Image (cartoon, rainbow, N blue to C red):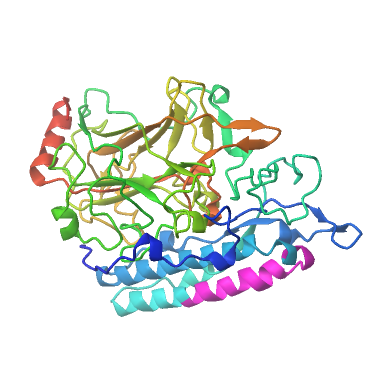
């Protein structure tokens, strides 16, 4: 299935910013504070218990896209566009949640009546359109999709201090808007997350406890034990945008967070397969025009980046200095059970889940660690590394292909992870497994008294609160046929090539 739609992109500087939904911080970015507000407020001379609704930290919506299966090819563009609109609706509802704390404190039904109820109605309208588009194209839409329209408010279950208090022991009155370094519940950064509980000292992580999800190169006599490494740099060309060509083709700002790109240099939501094939590449081997991309990491140190006022950046809570990897190792490895076959050109793979904080961790697939501590891996925490140790961010992609499709309706079903014995599920065949290891030089954040100072965090959808478990990685294979055959032969022969 080719991607042939193309529209003119708007320059970053002219994108519409949702500035009316929040307050400006230091001339750049928007305030996203008070997600962990107090359990009581005192605005009228007497204490009153705050409503449960005001304790809502974020919005938890069923992921409609992951539930869709039977979408005819000619309807996929329309369906992806509708799903992207649904993401924007969640972002807008989350902005309203973040900026109406006083109203929530005074009305126990405010969140339901003014935010969640209208959001359900808007989602229901989109689901109806998705069902219609699928049926018109000759598919059979799931009649139960309507059950996914309703969203819930998720409580603030990861409070900065565990009890909703400010650093001085006083209850927050809900009016602190952050960004002033006062030790409030937004770390003084003006954004919701990460919080202290999102970090762990690497020395406190037990070794060899995380299932690496077939993350090791093949071993054993029956496997294909070779490797192929491609050097594509670390985004020296400063190619950034907040699009997602795989999940939201043809949709500007479809990711709602900024991506790093290496490899293919024509990466935006409107790039067709032909555009990708004709593009330049940052890879040393010019036969590899594949696109490799991931959410940027940022240091929340007050830096005003180029996207501080843009959608995908500061306008959606992604603020601070963008951190490029010191090293990006991109490697393909084999199968523990036998030979691998060539990937088809333009095969698309998404691994991890940008919405894992609300979706759950079933698809979470990034391993965080520190150099020198590679036997200690964690998925749901950012590591605090000792001096001289780099933060490591490793992703091992699905390596079983259905043998037919370069994409699927939910962008997952055409690929699978190997089973426990290293074999592919029935109907799937092994292809070279892509492994991406990013190493960063990051000053270690300080965590004291339940507060984290100068944290680093992955860019995320606003409602995902910069949780490490939301990290993800994307790949489109644009190797020429000769190079792909070389990769396969190298791996099957048990050699290490580049």
In the displayed structure, 82 sits above or below 187; it is below
Q: Residue furthest front?
A: 27
- Residue at the (31%, 57%) spot, across then down: 246
> Is 106 a magenta residue?
yes
Residue 266 in percent (x, y) is at 23, 54
Q: With respect to residue 190, does 117 lie above or below?
A: below
Q: Is residue 20 left or right of residue 472?
A: right
Examine the residues drawn in magenta and state their main secondary structure.
helix
Magenta-span inclusion, residue 199: no
Q: Decide which of 372, 168 is in the foreground and name it.
A: 168
* Chain part drawn in magenta: 104-125
Which residue is at 58% across, 24% downward?
A: 204
The reply, left or right, for residue 360 in relation to residue 487 is right
Residue extending furthest toward the right: 46
Q: Where on the picture, by quarter, is residue 23?
A: bottom right
* Residue 345 placement (x, y as % from top left): 17, 51
Left or right of residue 482, residue 423 in this image: right
Report x, y in % for residue 267: 27, 54
- Residue 151 visible, this orientation: no
């Amino acid at each position: 299935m080719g991607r042939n739609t193309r529209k003119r992109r708007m320059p970053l500087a002219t994108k519409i910013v949702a500035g009316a939904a929040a307050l400006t911080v230091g001339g750049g970015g928007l305030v996203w504070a008070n997600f962990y507000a107090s359990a009581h407020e005192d605005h009228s001379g007497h204490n009153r218990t705050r409503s449960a609704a005001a304790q809502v930290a974020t919005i938890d919506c069923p992921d409609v896209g992951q539930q869709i299966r039977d979408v005819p090819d000619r309807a996929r563009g329309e369906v992806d566009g509708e799903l992207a609109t649904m993401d924007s609706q969640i972002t807008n509802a989350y902005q309203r949640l973040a900026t109406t704390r006083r109203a929530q404190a005074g009305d126990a039904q405010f969140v339901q009546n003014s935010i969640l109820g209208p959001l359900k109605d808007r989602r229901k309208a989109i689901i109806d359109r998705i069902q219609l588009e699928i049926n018109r194209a000759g598919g059979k839409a799931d009649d139960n999709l309507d059950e996914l329209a309703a969203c819930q408010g998720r409580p603030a279950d990861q409070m900065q201090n565990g009890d909703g208090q400010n650093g001085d022991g006083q209850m927050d009155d809900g009016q602190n808007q952050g960004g002033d370094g006062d030790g409030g519940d937004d770390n003084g950064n003006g954004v919701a997350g990460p919080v202290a509980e999102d970090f762990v000292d690497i020395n406190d992580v037990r070794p060899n406890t995380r299932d690496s999800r077939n993350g090791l190169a093949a071993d054993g006599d029956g496997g294909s034990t070779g490797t192929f490494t491609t050097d594509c740099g670390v985004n020296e060309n400063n190619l950034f945008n907040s699009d997602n060509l795989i999940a939201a083709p043809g949709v500007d700002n479809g990711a709602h967070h900024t991506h790093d790109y290496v490899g293919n240099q024509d990466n935006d939501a409107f790039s067709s397969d032909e555009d990708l094939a004709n593009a330049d590449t940052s890879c040393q081997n010019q036969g590899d025009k594949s696109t490799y991309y991931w959410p940027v990491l940022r240091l929340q140190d007050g830096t005003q980046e180029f996207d501080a006022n843009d959608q995908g950046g500061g306008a959606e809570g992604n603020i601070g200095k963008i951190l490029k990897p010191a090293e990006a190792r991109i490697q393909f490895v084999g199968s523990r059970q036998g030979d691998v076959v060539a990937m088809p050109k333009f095969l698309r793979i998404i691994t991890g889940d940008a919405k894992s904080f609300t979706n759950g961790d079933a698809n979470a697939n990034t391993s965080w660690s520190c150099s020198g501590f590679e036997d200690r891996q964690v998925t749901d925490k950012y590591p605090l590394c000792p001096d001289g140790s780099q933060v490591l961010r490793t992703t091992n992609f699905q390596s079983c292909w259905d043998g037919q499709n370069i994409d699927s309706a939910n962008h997952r079903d055409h690929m699978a992870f190997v089973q426990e014995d290293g074999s592919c599920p029935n109907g799937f065949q092994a292809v070279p497994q892509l492994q991406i290891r990013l190493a960063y030089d990051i000053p270690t954040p300080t965590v004291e008294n339940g507060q984290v100072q100068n944290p680093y965090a992955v860019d995320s959808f606003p409602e995902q609160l910069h949780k490490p478990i939301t990290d993800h990685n994307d790949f489109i294979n644009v190797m020429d046929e000769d190079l792909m055959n070389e990769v396969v032969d190298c791996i099957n022969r048990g050699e290490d090539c580049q």
